[in-house]
Image (tube, grey):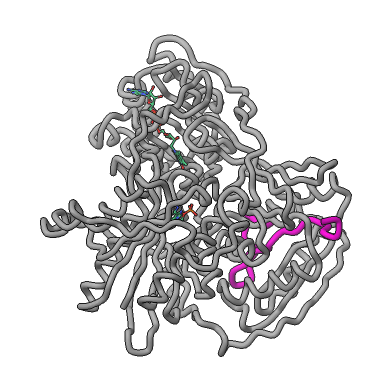
Amino acid sequence: MEEYQGVWVFIEQSEGEIAGVSLELLGAGRQLADKLEVPLAGVLLGEKVRELSTQVIGHGADIVYLIDDPVLKYYRTESYMKCVNNLALKYRPEIFLYGATPNGKDLASAVATDLSTGLTADTTMLDVDVEKRLLEASRPAFGGNIMATILCKKNRPQMATVRPKVMKALPFDGVRIGEVVEEMIELSEEDMRTKVLEIVKNVTKAASLADAHVIVCGGKGMGDLEGFELIHELADTIGASVGGTRDVIEAGWLPHELQIGQTGETVTPKIYFAIGLSGAIQHVVGMKNSELIIAINKDPNAPIFEAATYGIVGDAFEVVPKLIEQFKQIRVKQGGEVSYV
Amino acid sequence: MHIVVCVKQVPDTKIIKINPKTNTLDRRSAPAILNPYDAHAVQEAVRLKSILGRGKISVLSMGPPQATEVIKKCIEIGADEGYLISDRAFAGADTLATSYALSKALEKIASVDPIDLVICGKHAIDGDTGQVGPGIARRLDIPPVTNVIEVSEVNSNDRTIVIKRKLSNGYELVQANMPCLLTVEKEINKIEYSPLSNMLKAARYKSHIWSVSDLGEVNITQLGLKGSPTVVGKMFTPPKLEGGKMLDGTSDEQVSQLMEVLLEQKELLNVK
Ligand SMILES: Cc1cc2nc3c(=O)[nH]c(=O)nc-3n(C[C@H](O)[C@H](O)[C@H](O)COP(=O)(O)OP(=O)(O)OC[C@H]3O[C@@H](n4cnc5c(N)ncnc54)[C@H](O)[C@@H]3O)c2cc1C
Ligand SMILES: Nc1ncnc2c1ncn2[C@@H]1O[C@H](COP(=O)(O)O)[C@@H](O)[C@H]1O
């Protein structure tokens, strides 16, 4: 196992743009690599993506493993997996991180199977036991307000997918120096069994939730579909996006692309209203990095108050209408519209 | 066309309750159900079969003997046959060992009736990994298409399928050769009411149950706990977030304090 060394990050890119989560993972990977005193590498695949190496190095990598090939123009499991497997078998990283995005998860699952190694899904905390050189990948565990640390003791590389927006990217450093190692792998379009016919961007509501500056998230405490209207009303009044907890989605009060949390979207708006939701760990991991968190819950012991910047213990049906009223009054006073952008 | 759907029995995490003192699950509170995503996977198989006007749908599950219950549920939705692999040797499997065991069972099913399409759920709600589907695809060496929100076309003649696949910021249209493996999102379809004839069939249905020895050549070191590279190191309550300021007083006072805070966010406020 000693021949496995170094920390790797899969750099996800689409049409020449690096995914935010990949830069975040370079930030997190940098810390792990420093602790282990090994280099940090980014794995960059695509067509005409050579120039992106500068960004990968500028955000913390020492090495970029690059494969540039027309067959890699779009992400496809078969071509990407072949490249990643080859690189991993040749250079043997001890830790290999991927963004927990549709493509990152798909790729990591395939690679883990071929390399016959362990893969931890949807990690939200990363650390390393330096002595044992063990990756400690933690994620909310089944059911409760509890985290589980998953280890992969005997197999290498130790792999994990990591949720977007929970790690911090390093600021770009234009003078950082790194090495670009370009590899060639035989790929032919004829061998491919899948073809990407078209990519359509930004059509799902989830994307707008991920970009929203202000989110009003309601929970099961709103009682029923009718009660949940109050969440929409507040959001409309202040120009915010609406989200819900899993219980809300399961109850059918909102479409499931508006679920926030471990199994939904991770969001980091400037203002997050958490109303009538308890603050289960699976929910909190998806919103705790919001800048200003306002919680309204009638139970003073609700865990959401631990995540909140400001908490109000009270009945949402009493507090929220008053809040809406206040905004409406300002609007009248100002003679125009008051809303968040 | 032979479609095999992989289905898992999971505790209903909606109903499950946690003991706040011990941080453990109160399992008594959790009835076992068919993983909701897998129900949509079966429904999609039923939809495809009815569009094509012919075909066969098998479902496969790995789990304890009670998991035959979810197989019955699948028969109700419209599956034709159900297989359960159940053995102590499978216990404690992580996703790597699970995909190995399931792929062995799929090979056995395919040896009698070749498989054109495997469908899995996007993930199982008890662990939320979504790793088993792509793992199976690798082991069978067929292409995976994950996060499917629509099967747009099935061309039986040239054996291709066109699929809408959800991405982080949109979707893509992918064409794949069959056989291939899909993992489906919930929005792919709506679960239909089952006809009475399905209900009757389900009530009487006896699943095929296989143990390890029924699976032919299997490397038992790759099964169950032994075949699982990942282990749970420790469980812990996450570092307590600090929590912030509680706004006290009557609801009017609370709201006016909150307004002060909100109006401070000037760069966000758009007063026209
Ligand atoms: C594997 C797994 C993954 C999960 N993923 C997610 C996920 O991605 N996102 C997610 O959100 N959850 C997820 N969950 C579920 C999570 O554990 C919780 O069950 C869920 O978040 C609870 O939703 P809730 O807060 O709306 O409901 P509850 O926990 O029922 O909370 C309702 C709250 O409303 C308060 N309340 C009631 N009435 C009022 C009122 N009139 N005014 C003010 N407050 C009121 C109550 O005091 C209570 O605190 C997951 C669970 C599992 C097992
Ligand atoms: N024990 C199992 N038996 C049958 N299918 C399973 C099993 N575990 C996982 N699957 C399939 O793999 C999908 C993803 O599961 P997971 O990777 O555990 O989130 C599920 O939706 C099922 O289709």
Quarter that holds the N terminus of chain A = bottom right
* Left or right, B197 with reference to B258: left
Give A122 or B124, whichever is nearer the viewer.
B124
Instruction: Give the answer, above or below, for where B22 lies relative to A259.
Output: above
Residue at left offset 51%, top offset 23%: A305
In the rendered image, residue A37, in percent from the top left (x then y), is placed at 88, 49
Give B41 or A335, whichever is nearer the viewer.
B41
Residue B189, by quadrant, is bottom left
* Left or right, B28 with reference to A184: left
Which image quadrant shows ligand 2? bottom left
In the rendered image, residue A284, in percent from the top left (x then y), is placed at 52, 35
In the rendered image, residue B119, in percent from the top left (x then y), is placed at 39, 65
Residue at left offset 23%, top offset 34%: A226
- Residue B80 sits inside the magenta stretch: no
Outermost residue to the top: B249
Residue at left offset 58%, top offset 54%: A100
- Residue A18 sits inside the magenta stretch: yes
Start-end of magenta stretch = A1-22
Give A203 or B30, whichever is nearer the viewer.
B30
Visible in this render: residue A275? Answer: no
Give B25 or A185, whichever is nearer the viewer.
B25
Visible in this render: residue A251? Answer: yes
Residue A4, by quadrant, is bottom right
Outermost residue to the left: B196
Instruction: Give the answer, above or below, for where B198 lies relative to B248.
Output: below
In the rendered image, residue A243, in percent from the top left (x then y), is placed at 40, 42
* Left or right, A185 with reference to A106: right
Q: What number of labels is visible?
A: 0
* Left or right, B104 with reference to A172: left
